[in-house]
Amino acid sequence: MIPVFGIDPLQVVGGTIAVAVLGVLAGLVFLGIDRKVTAHMQARIGPPIRQPFRDVRKLLCKDSIVPENAIPWLFNAAPIVALASAIVILLYLPAGSIAPVFGGYGDIILVMYLLTVPALAMVAGGFASGSPYATVGSQREMVTMISYEFPLAIAIIAVAWRLAAAGIADPFSIATIAANPVWSVVGPLGFAGCLILLVVLAWVTPAELSRIPCDTPEAETELAGGLLVEYSGRNLALFYLASGVKTVAMASLAVALFLPWNISGYLALPPAAGYAADIAFFLLKMLVVVFFSVSVIRVGMARFRITHVVSVYWGYLAGLGLLGLLLVVLDVAFGAGVIA
Amino acid sequence: MSEEAKKGYSVPIGPIHPALKEPILFTFQMNGEKVEKVDFAPGKAHRGIEWMGMRRNPVQIVHLTDRICGICGVSHTLAFSRAVEQVAEIEVPERAHYVRTIIAEYERIQSHLLWAGVAAHELGFDTLFYLAWRVREESLDVIEYLTGNRVNYGIVQVGGVRRDITADQFPRIEASLSYYEDLFGKMLTLFLEDTTIKMRSRNTGVMNQQEALELCAIGPTARASGLNMDVRQDSPYAAYGDVDVRAVMPEQYLGEARGDVYDRIVVRLLEVKQSIDIVRQCMDQMPAGEVTAEPKIPKLLALCKKAEGEAVGRVEAPRGECLHYVRMDGHEQPLAWKVKASTYSNQMSWLKILQGEQLADIPIIVASIDPCMSCTDRVTVLRDGRRDVLTKEELHRLSVEKTRRLQS
């Protein structure tokens, strides 16, 4: 094929489809594992791991009801935008040793912005529902977004900045971040700083994914589902898939930033098996991230009030993130670790 | 800003909503996330139980009263039986008093644990909800062991109880009591020292002592606001006169009563401990003897049929005072029977404790008085197919008419 703007269309189309399918599958599997693990931690049996697949199948068979007060085009477009934008994030993130489809065309800042698009689509869908519950849910989602953006940005920028200080070219590129684990360039202070940032990122994840304690926008007992209250059938299935894909995206972002190692280098494997081993290891790392930042947190906490979300994320977590950033900066200032 | 925008918006919660375990309609005038004005309309769970009762005899009614509420059935039956026993001048044997007390205290344990689970769920803390409900199973198992039923126990009868608790059943009771004692410390830590629960429930839904008094709050809701009142302590019934019962106050645990949601959690959890102690005392002191004044039902019915007069039966249900008024006039069925459940007294405090609170706290504040709508809903007004709201004057006129009717 003839490259367009330096991209091979066939590779991009094929890659996008593959990423979409795998992203959705992985997302649903993660949701299933999360439900099962959570159930066991709560001394329940829990649904089988394939339950999310059944849920989606059932939802896809059902009619989508559009409320009378809704703005139909926006109401129906929101779930599609949410799912599509969640899949787009995956196109910029590496999976194991496989480079991202759009690896050369966007950096981690772009990913940070893309992460807000599914949430914005949900907000738009909520406002378009014409229900007071959904409206309150949408307002809360916006407040939540504003709250977690800052700690998230601190974590991402600190890592990229540390790599830049180590003299690594193009530090904001995800390929660079994934190829140069930040732990290998920091000194002891920076190590402590990065650990703090890892904790911050782990706490941003439930807010990003609207899970307990930050499920205020959906808040079953308060808002009866919040911004999703009017959604049903196919539209709800799309939002459900989007939340699965977002889980994968957040987990792979955390993996790319803080746990980017691959195992194929340590094992003498033929190339194909090496890729497979890396993917398996990558999935395992994601599972660990999902377990600690979604399942464990949501088992151990009650829901925040929206005011608490703001104070916790703007106050405690932003403060913690700044402390981590400060340690990373001091690390460079004292000349520990790798410095250009 | 236009006048319209200043008014904010209104959020209906109910009649059916995940935050509510029973149907009731709340209408909130909101300003952003803040509650400006509250109104609520009960009467969605009216089943005409009093109507049914006034067409039946007392022996049949005790099985209806069991079904007024799925949680505190025995409190209603006990209150009703006490009223009928006073009218018919039936002397209840000592041992029956003890059996009644043990069952009533088990009911309190299961009710408070059920409430604790619901409260955790309203706060979005599902792990604690599952834990509380799993722990609650033990009390249901014991109730089933003692009465044969897990809900609607059917154990209290006018004049006594229908089944004895024998000495060979004590080890099972004792096992469950020590099970709860072992767990008690853990439950206190989980509920009272958890940061998120404290954050959500401290200084939320506050009602001070004066307000609680003015709004006629009762039961744990009143005690959490610092009102020292408990029917078991103030006018002992059943075996409560023989055992050591003191109203559980939040001061005992925290040194002060703020009257917030947190204090209501404290009171209910401590009452579980109190119930354990009461059951134990009852088992120690239980006298021998009959468990019913009149085992022959036809004879009991004849006694009730002869009775004339009126009486009030008061019982401290898990949610507060439960009151039954019965008037008999020498017929098989009572002339009048009025049920006043605890939530009826407590529900007005919603207007105070929800005022100015956050939307997010509505579910837990509503749940904090442990509302039971099916206990409370004794009336629903339907005229020409539409619902009416009766004003104070109309209600007064109606009650005067009713009193006249009863007196004639």
Image (cartoon, coloured by chain):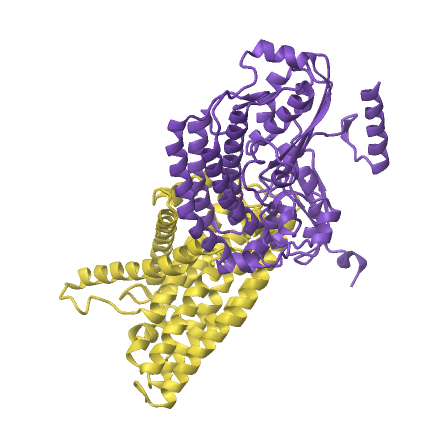
**Residue B403, position as x, y percentages in the image:** 82, 25
**Residue B206, position as x, y percentages in the image:** 66, 55
Give the colour of chain A: yellow
| In-front residue for pair A246/A38 | A38
Q: Is residue A235 left or right of residue B329?
A: left
In this rendering, the answer to whether B204 lies above or below B229 is: below
| In-front residue for pair B64/A334 | B64
**Residue B24, position as x, y percentages in the image:** 66, 38
Could you tell me which quadrant the N terminus of chain A lies in?
Answer: bottom left
Give the colour of chain B: purple
| In-front residue for pair B48/A130 | B48
| In-front residue for pair A74/A219 | A219
Image-quadrant location for residue A144: bottom right
Please indicate, yes or no, whether residue A23 appears anywhere in the rendered image. yes
**Residue A299, position as x, y percentages in the image:** 42, 53
Q: In this figure, what is the number of numbered marks?
A: 0
Residue found at x 41% / y 34%: B173
In this rendering, the answer to whether B388 lies above or below B54 is: below
Please indicate, yes or no, whether residue A90 appears anywhere in the rendered image. no
Could you tell me which quadrant the C terminus of chain A lies in?
Answer: bottom left
Q: Is residue B185 left or right of residue A141?
A: left
Residue found at x 14% / y 63%: A270
Image-quadrant location for residue B252: bottom right
In this rendering, the answer to whether B200 lies above or below B105 is: below
